[in-house]
């Protein structure tokens, strides 16, 4: 490091930003002195972004309608349907407009949209979202499939399944089958998929801007437990993927134990890590990482794997 050594950066993260020593050391191990820039950027609320739902509206129509309500939409150049949102004073919350309630858009982070676009689901395919959560990515998959083919959305938690059903209905997704089950039990379904998205459960170390208490809570035990779950889910996804099929694996974590090390296990089995174009760059990499101080987003990892 140029100005500060590792111990000094760790100390500053602990003393000035409230990270516990474990988290601070991990962050410095990943980013070096840039960890301070990431920590500073995470102290501020992230910019709002939405995804326009082309199943129900057009870009032009929604921009006009939201513009009339005091919202300015700014195209995110590396996404097909994503926009940054700037709001004038006294505008309604993004989740309370008529357009939102009728499913014309989804409030969604750019890396989440990027993960779905990296999957590149096509009309007529059979696609799996193995950890669907509330359905942000699942509804985008359905949108890109143009409601053709079949999307299976798996989510184990009852509360999230309720939100998933609500969002699938609100966004007009008619090709989606929702299953409440543990994704590790996927092989019991005896199904084969063209594409699989696994936005895996993780330590959420990349979203401290939304959940500041994570700075003091994330532990080595958390990393180990989440990595074990991620490996099991990815193995289940890979077993259900057809030869030549594609998996996109993503997490909202800074840690390589939850990113590169997990997908590396599939590479060891002969899978190909398909190059991705990093946002705003022309050089392809085997995975993409987002950072708050670089992209204005949460910390996020995306990798695309092809089964040989």
Image (cartoon, grey):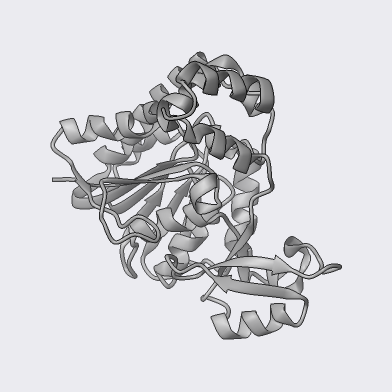
Between 130 and 292, the one lying in front of the other is: 292
Query: In which quarter of the view is residue 151 placed?
Result: bottom left
Residue at left offset 32%, top offset 33%: 260
Q: Nearer the viewer, residue 238 or 26?
A: 26
- Residue 245 lies, in percent from the top left, at 22, 52
Q: What percent of the width, then of the height, locates residue 153?
A: 46, 50
56 vs 262, left or right, is right
Residue 176, percent across and down? 47, 59
Name the residue at 58% across, 18% down.
11
Residue at position x 41%, y 30% from top? 30
166 relative to 144, above or below: above
Residue under the image location 37 percent in, 34 percent down: 259
Residue 67 location, x and y as percent?
71, 80
**Tally of numbered discs:** 0
Residue 181, placed above or below residue 150: above
Q: Quadrant of residue 235?
A: top left
Relative to 231, is 171 on the left or the right?
Answer: right
> Residue 166, can we see it?
yes
Q: Is residue 9 above or below residue 212?
A: above
User: Is 307 positioned to the left or the right of 133 in the image?
Assistant: left
Q: Quadrant of the C terminus?
A: top left
Residue 225 visible in the shown view:
no
In the rendered image, the quadrant that contains the N terminus is top left
Task: State the residue lying farthest toward the right.
Answer: 90
């Amino acid at each position: 490091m140029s100005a500060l050594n590792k111990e000094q950066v760790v100390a500053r993260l602990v003393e000035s930003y409230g990270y516990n020593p474990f988290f601070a050391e991990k962050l410095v191990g990943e980013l070096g002195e840039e960890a301070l820039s990431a920590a500073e950027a995470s102290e501020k609320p992230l910019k709002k972004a939405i995804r326009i739902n082309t199943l129900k509206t057009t870009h032009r129509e929604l921009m006009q309608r939201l513009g009339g309500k005091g919202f300015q939409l700014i195209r995110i150049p590396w996404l097909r349907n994503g926009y940054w949102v700037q709001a004038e004073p006294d505008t309604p919350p993004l989740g309370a407009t008529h357009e939102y309630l009728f499913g014309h858009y989804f409030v969604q982070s750019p890396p989440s949209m990027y993960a779905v676009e990296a999957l590149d689901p096509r009309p007529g395919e059979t696609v799996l979202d193995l950890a669907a959560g509330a359905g942000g990515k699942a509804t985008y998959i359905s949108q890109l499939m143009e409601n053709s083919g079949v999307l299976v959305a798996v989510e184990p938690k009852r509360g999230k399944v309720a939100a998933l059903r609500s969002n699938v209905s609100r966004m007009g997704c008619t090709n989606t089958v929702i299953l409440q089950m543990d994704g590790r039990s996927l092989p019991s379904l005896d199904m084969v998929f063209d594409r699989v998205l696994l936005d895996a459960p993780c330590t959420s170390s990349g979203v401290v801007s939304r959940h500041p208490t994570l700075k003091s809570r994330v532990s080595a035990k958390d990393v180990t437990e989440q990595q074990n779950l991620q490996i099991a889910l990815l193995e289940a996804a890979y077993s259900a993927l057809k030869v030549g099929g594609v998996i996109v694996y993503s997490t909202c974590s800074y840690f390589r134990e939850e990113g590169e090390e997990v997908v590396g296990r599939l590479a060891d089995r002969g899978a190909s890590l398909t190059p991705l174009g990093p946002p705003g760059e022309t050089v392809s990499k085997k995975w993409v990482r987002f950072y708050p101080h670089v992209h204005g987003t949460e910390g996020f990892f995306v990798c695309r794997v092809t089964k040989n």
